[in-house]
Amino acid sequence: MAQQSGNDLKAVMEKLLQAFEDEVDSELPHREVLDHIFRILKANKEKIISEPPEVGKREKLPELLRSIGDALQQCKARSKQQQSESDKAKSKKMTMPSDAGEETVTEYYEWTTSYVDESRIYGWDKEANEVVDALVGKEGEDEDQVLFRTAGIAGIHGSGKTALAQKVFVHDRIKDAFPLRLWVCVGPPDHEDRFNLLYRMLDNLGLDTAKVEDIVDKADVVVKAATDEDKDKSRIGVLLFILYVTLYKTGYLIVFDDIRAYSDWYSNLTLQPPKDGEWYERLAYGLPKARKSAVLVTCRSEDGAGVMVRTGGVFHPPKLEGEEGWKLFHREYKEAKDKDKGEEEEEDKLYKELQEMKEEIIGKCLGLPVGIVQAAKGFAALEHEPEADAKDNAAADQAATSKDRTWTCN
């Protein structure tokens, strides 16, 4: 019996030391204290196991090890929470190959959050109201008649799907209708990580992800799974069940932004969870429909959006034109301009010239927000060249070219 206890103690010690070793590169709170504790444990591991202390202290040793393990888990959870808080306004950077195959296009995905900067959203009031009506119900209707609603926004890359969804997200009627609002960035299919997606959602909903992870790993359906693949499926199922229970107590709006993996897992978000079946099979099972709630998705495929929202409407962001388009150009131009130059707007002669061509510039961008942004940044990188200097430079270039040709002929 004593030998068995020694083996159990050894297993606990090794697991605890390995758990700390896995966090070697993590920025844990109280790092110095943890380093000191685990340095002592590692140095005395064999002695503690082979020469257990007297009976009174021996009984307290497992409890002490559990306390150290709990402290480590709390530090890990706090580290994740701090990371989440600091990254809410920070982007998650992914580099994807361009259509040309030579250059790269860098895309940014915000962390799962419930914060949107309203000051950076322009235009589209009418379109936003239409999407709000689809999610809440038209004004004057019995809005509580339907408990769960869905809607989609579809369009090509850079067309403004996310901006329109943000406009909806911060709409007054949405805020009044749904006590809980959650924005979830999904991203490209080859970066799809369902575990990460669900953990981010649960973390933003206020759950301790370290405890969630412990619950998932100890769940019977996970423990009894025969293969690693079955274990992963079971873990997804448990996470979806935890999400369901967490959301069940309140009405919510969840925006799933930029879904590109048009798999069965994302399809038909209106489905109820199975009475007899596997929870891991669909994201819809983690979304309760017992109280007034809604889901909004954005994606590049209209058909994909239709499969996800089923009877819900699919909307399209219109072109960003006129003054609203110029507001976006102005903001991006000014932000990209070198602040060290300290140029006032009236001193920026290039900007004055651009203002005279604003209709042409926005038109050339086809009303696409991504085109307007890139144009603004491109112009901001240019140095203004006075018209007289430009003519002189052009004449000089022409003369130099002529001279080169003469010299070549000789």
Image: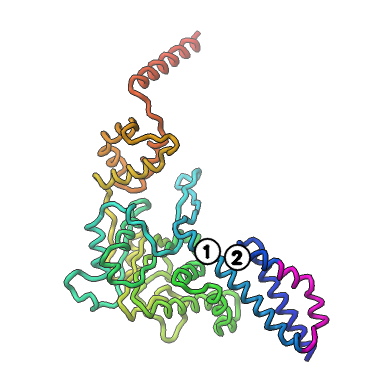
Q: Quadrant of residue 327?
A: top left
For this view, does 210 lie left or right of residue 327? right
Most extreme residue toward the left is 140
Q: Is residue 172 left or right of residue 41?
A: left
The rendered magenta stretch, by its main secondary structure, is classed as helix
Residue visible at 43% across and 62% down in the picture: 185
Q: Image height check: is 266 above or below 25? A: below
Magenta segment, which residues? 36-55
Give neighbour class at mark 1: few <14, some 14-19, many 20+ (Cα, 10 Å): some
In whole angstroms, how far apart are the C-alphas of marks 1 and 2?
10 Å
Note whether 333 is above or below 261 in the view shown. above
Mark before the other along the chain sequence, 1 or 2: 2
Mark 1, residue position: 82
At horizontal 27% and vertical 41% (from top left) the residue drawn is 363
Q: Amino acid at mark 2?
A: Pro
Residue at 49%, 49% (x, y): give it. 97
